[in-house]
Amino acid sequence: MKLIYGKGSTGQALANFCEKKNIDYVVVDDNDFKPSMLNNIDEIIVSPGIPFFADIYKLAKKNKIPIIGEIEFAYRYKKGKIIAITGTDGKSTTSKLVYDVLKDFYNNVFIGGNYGIPFISFVDNLTGDSITVLEVSSFQLYSTKAFKPDIAVILNIDVDHLNWHKKLKHYVCSKLKITKNQTDKDYLIINENLKKLSFKTKAQVLEIDIKETDFLNTEKLNLKGKHNLENISVAIKIAKILELDLEKVKKAVENFKPLEHRLEYLGNFNGRKIYNDAKSTTVQATKKAIEAMDSPVILIAGGIDKGGNFKDLVDVLRKKVKLVVLIGKDKEKIHKQINFQKTLFASTLEEALNISIKHSDKGDTILFSPACASFDMFKNYIDRGNQFKKLVKKLNDS
């Protein structure tokens, strides 16, 4: 019998699959799990949010019961090729871009994983000619064992999720598991900065190179910033591996729109451009967002610190930012680290937006890019972004 640990969308998808396959299972979470339930359990499948230090991992080890994640379980049933994309920032945008490019060439393309669609929910629909694009997080990779993508991508690795991993080394090692089982017939695409990390792979290693985007008309691109050119170059690199027509790839890339809450342009208010970058939960993501702006920036940031070093923002703040407006639980901590003279505090997101409007001029950019987790004031980054969008709409309607 399988014990599915977690009752969210992943747990429900696992239960549906087991029901369909006549696999005996029980679904539990922290609220109703009892150690006695492990009697007659031959395997535990955890949802991505269950950290490695949770009691269920300790009990599994004590009782010698295998414990894996949903990605690993679904992989047993996969057919066709897998392209797996990980990284601290840019995973979702790159995954969706690669998916959109491939859709123009193949009829049987799927997207899932950390993107929001459990792999197990569609694995039964795969055939031998399917291509699955999986966005995979460090949480998901940690609980893999046999998982082996045909093409693996590591976009970048920066400090993140230390509340889950506890140590940076643990986080990095989890990311690198993406290539652990690859062979010399597989590909690993990495940022050149990752070459300094000591890791072994049998895959053919290719570096992300924005020069591969030179044949594109950058003025036609909807994705802003150098970091997005890196994301685009990954899609082009994969297209070359699969020997696709680059002119057709070019059209797909130029038609691609930014995902919601990721440098999402909300329009112009009294001459000020407003961007919703609520998905930026790390310092590096916010740094890249600021660098992508082409006019003076009013930055709204703050929330719950995830272990990042906000001093990394100092240079870009001096070069491009007129004012920082901080919100959230760790706003004082952030202020001490950035030591930016033109900083104001707000108690709510609405107050932060009003301050930004008041202290900005025509031609400026108001950028909401928190560099933090959202759970102090919002349900998640989606709620955070939606609330910001409502506030901007309210401004325009008034």
Image (cartoon, rainbow, N blue to C red):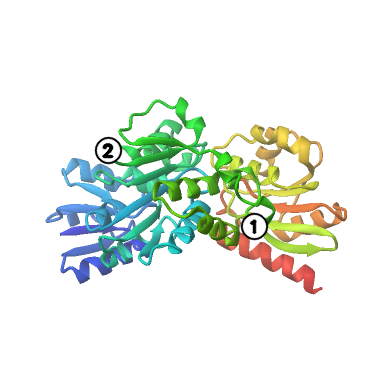
Q: Position of residue 177 (x, y in %)?
A: 34, 39
Crowding near the residue tagged with mark 2, few <14, some 14–19, many ≥20 C-alpha atoms within 10 Å: some
Establish if 194 lies above or below 214.
above
Q: Which mark is residue 183?
A: 2
Residue behind mark 1: 222
Assign a secondary structure to mark 1. Answer: loop
Q: Is residue 247 left or right of residue 345?
A: left
Q: Residue at x 60, y 34 (%)?
A: 309
The amino acid marked with disc number 1 is Asn
Determine which quarter of the picture holds residue 353: bottom right
Confirm whether residue 75 shows in the render.
yes
Sequence order check: which comes first, mark 2 or mark 1? 2
Q: Is residue 156 left or right of residue 169?
A: right
Q: Position of residue 349 (x, y in %)?
A: 70, 58
Determine which quarter of the picture holds residue 76: bottom left
In depth, the one of 349 and 265 nearer the eye is 265
Q: Position of residue 191 (x, y in %)?
A: 50, 36
